[in-house]
Amino acid sequence: MPIGIIVNAFSIAIGGVLGALVGHKLSEELKTKVQMIFGVCSMSMGISTIVLMKNMPAVIFSIIIGTALGVVIHLENKINRAGAGMQKIISKVIPCETTKLFPRPSGHVLRDAPQGIHMDSSDIPEEEFMATLITVIVLFCSSGTGIYGSIVSGMSGDHSILIAKSILDLFTAMIFACTLGMVVAVIAVPQLIIFLILFFCAGLIFPLTTPEMIDDFKACGGILMLATGFRMIKVKMFPTADMIPAMIIVMPISYIWMTYVLPLVS
């Protein structure tokens, strides 16, 4: 049962609704500081799984080769384009505020905003709205933590990563919905579909793995979570999207290392 994935999707939906309803009451200082806390939490989650690493050379090699592969195939650009396509679909579900979000006098409330929702659009033109929305779609639907957590959940039934991510996503969705409105809540639908596919595919892979391979996979995912944390606190913009292929190749490389390389060097 994909409990963690369902909880994660609901957290985004609830956060998006709450942010659209009460987001205008939150100060910019609070939003900025909470975002920093999100980064620290992501880094802490990453460190807790990195320590499970069994074959360091295999994991490091996977990170380097996987990232290089992601850069060569321009994975980050492709994910961004997919996010743009998703945005077009979402904007049809909620005919958005994008056509109305040109700069207005501070404190202006959109007349045709949904009843009960205050929408201050003083600082966000249409182009910035679209760019931010694509960023949010990519963040929720293709984050290293989400992909990693879905696969771990499918392989081992451990939902703790996704549930911890759900707490972060609840507040992240709330913060973004302060600017983007109710459309953030709809992102939960494509995210649910993507993560469920990963969950069920992982269940097919699990019988072919060993405990050491799974631990190395978790450690690889932890490194991506650590890099994500650095991005969130804006210390260093690691190419986390380009790092995703490392999670695909780490288990085969871990197997090759343990089966063929380690006996030769030990």
Image (spheres, rainbow, N blue to C red):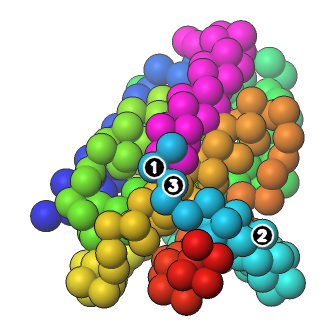
* Of residues 98 and 22, the one drawn nearer to the viewer in this rendering: 22
Q: Main secondary structure of the magenta part?
A: helix
Q: Are marks 2 and 1 in contact (CB under 8 Å)?
A: no
Element on which disc 1 rests? loop
Q: Residue furthest left?
A: 1
Q: Which residue is mark 1?
A: 52
Image quadrant assignment for residue 170: top left
* Of residues 63 and 199, the one drawn nearer to the viewer in this rendering: 63
Height in image: 223 above or below 243? above
Q: Are marks 1 and 3 in contact (CB under 8 Å)?
A: yes
Q: Is residue 6 left or right of residue 161?
A: left
Q: Amino acid at mark 1?
A: Leu
Q: Which residue is mark 3?
A: 53
Q: Give the residue displayed 28% in from the left and 70% down from the top.
A: 155
Please give the label number shown on residue 64.
2
Q: Which residues are magenta?
A: 25-50
* Of residues 133 and 209, the one drawn nearer to the viewer in this rendering: 209
